[in-house]
Amino acid sequence: MTFYAFMGALEQGFAYGFLVLGVYLTFRVLDFPDLTVDGSLPLGAAVSAVAISSGVDPWVSLLLALGAGFLAGMVTGILNTKFGILHLLASILTMIALYSINLRVMGAPNVTLLGKPTVLDPLLNAGLGPFAAAPLLFGVLSCLGLLGLFWLLHTAYGLAIQATGANRQMITSQGVNADHVIIFTVGLSNGLAALSGALLCQSQGAADVNMGIGTIVAGLASVIVGETLFGCRSVGRALLAALLGSAVYRLAIALALSLKLGSFSFTPSDLNLLTALLVVGALILPQLRRKVLWR
């Protein structure tokens, strides 16, 4: 793997860090399988790109993307809690609707940011190269997001979120409105996913309506890999493992794509196969470890 491929993988890993934290929040904390992120990530990219093209400050466009993703997640939560639609089906319906909404927002299948300002410009103007500026900025932002989520989960409301995922009937009997907790948490998860989309859009210089395909698989793979390698005995450790798992996952994919076994080599079209193999390996490794230790 070349140095530029390594730094590019770190950039992707930290850019997707918000998405992975959001996936951890719904799948692990709330126990809510949510596929909306496949639509909310390109939604965030679309909102950010259109806002910047209209003269909005790049940092403000990140907040707009966060808000748009939050609203998309709230729709999924409302369909599930208020209308009794199965969580998986509700998220699929929202994801499908978001494809058309993203096209409406952009007015075209893609929007370019060529020549437009981005959040990376201050670092680039300070003399940092693009291969150093993006990983540094995205790493700092994702760590701030981790700290914010860690703080939230240790507040009274955060404990209600954890309790709702563990035992909804119990937390309801304590007087907590579980429906509101679910709507807020799914909204926050998709807001984080949209924030990742906005960062990727500004890093890559374009937003595309198809950039969210396979997002949920990559997010789950990052969470599983992180838990396997770094453990998840506490909330703080699990959040850190998810974020590090995002970087490790992207590095593993970049390494696999750079390998050559004789005349055989992986291509970008093999990405889904590599992801499946990586997740299977991460799931099997703990079982093999336990069997070896038992023997």
Image (cartoon, grey):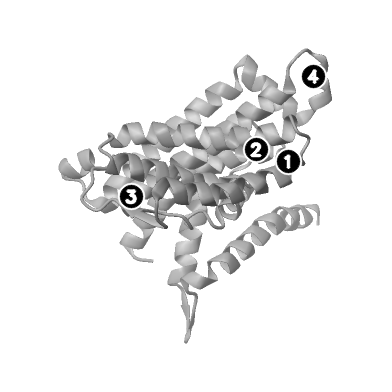
Residue that badge 3 annotates: 203
- Residue kind at label 4, given as amino acid type: Thr
Quadrant assignment for the C terminus = bottom right
Instruction: Specify the quadrant of the image occupied by residue 190.
Output: top right
Gap between marks 3 and 4 measured at Cα: 43 Å
- Crowding at label 4, few (<14), some or many (≥20) Cα neighbours within 10 Å? some
Residue 76 badge: 2
What's the distance in space between the residues labelled 4 and 1, CA to CA? 18 Å
First reached walking from the N terminus: tag 3 or tag 4? 4
Foreground mark, 3 or 2, reads 2
Q: Is residue 245 above or below residue 179?
A: below
Crowd class of label 1 (few under 14; some 14 to 19; many from 20; radius 10 Å):
some
Kindly identify the residue that appears in the image at 72 percent across and 25 percent down: 179
Type of residue at label 3? Ser
Q: Which residue is mark 1?
A: 87
Tell me the residue at 36%/62% (across/down). Answer: 5
In terms of secondary structure, where does tag 3 sit?
helix
Instruction: Give the residue displayed 63% in from the left and 22% down from the top.
Output: 158
Residue 74, percent from left and from top: 60, 32
**Chain-order first, disc 2 or disc 1:** 2
Quadrant housing residue 165: top right
Mark 3 neighbour density, 10 Å: few (under 14) some (14–19) many (20 or more):
many
Residue sitting at x 40%, y 55%:
108
Question: Alpha carbon of mark 2 to alpha carbon of mark 4: how far?
Answer: 20 Å
The amino acid type of the residue labelled 1 equals: His
**Amino acid type assigned to the residue bearing label 2 in the image:** Thr
The residue to which callout 4 is attached is 172
Callout 1: helix, strand or loop? helix
Where is 209 relative to 173, above or below? below
